[in-house]
Amino acid sequence: MKAKTTTALYYATTLLFSAFMLMAGIMELMQGPEGREIMRHLGYPEHVLLVLGAGKALGALALVQTRYRILKEWAYAGFTFNLLGACAARTAAHDSPALIVSPLLFLGFMGLSYLLWKKRQQLRTAPAANAPVATQLAVA
């Protein structure tokens, strides 16, 4: 895959995923009646909405920032735990298959963003294919 294609796909997947997580985080921070009902249904106390909302909002911001790679890694890890936990909670609550699988779909979409991010890092640090051999050796 070409560098421009990788970059375009990375930004598309990351911005869409981050926007969704930011909106979900804001909704959870607002503690609306729907969110409270879902927490009760899943067996969690309502104040968990604040923790999840703050984590999602901060994680979304961490994914779109470009300065600190470790923050991106933590955000990807946090979203992985969050989405796997959502799947497990929905399974334990005997919810419909659609509600059980939907977090896994978001996890797959986020995984694509993560893989594209890593691919972009590789492309940026790899020596240019057309560079003279002496330049390639100096880079390695």
Image: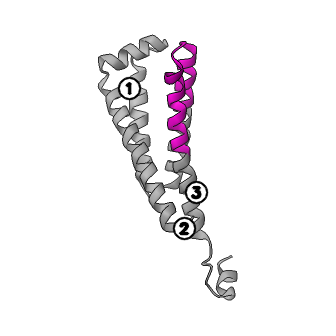
Instruction: Name the residue carrying label 3.
Output: 118
Start-end of magenta stretch: 82-111
- C-alpha separation, residue under disc 2 versus residue under disc 1: 41 Å
Report the residue at 43% width, 43% height from top: 17
In-image side of 67 versus 19 (left or right): right
Q: Quadrant of the N terminus?
A: bottom right
Q: Which mark, by number, is residue 50?
A: 1
- Residue 120 rendering spot, x and y as whole percentages: 54, 62
Q: Which mark, by number, is residue 2?
A: 2
* First in residue order: circle 2 vs circle 1: 2
Element at badge 2? loop
Residue density around tag 1, few if under 14, some if 14–19, many if 20 or more, within 10 Å:
some
Q: Amino acid at mark 2?
A: Lys
- Residue 135 rendering spot, x and y as whole percentages: 64, 85
**In the figure, 93 relative to 105: above or below?**
above
* First in residue order: circle 3 vs circle 1: 1
Q: Amino acid at mark 1?
A: Leu
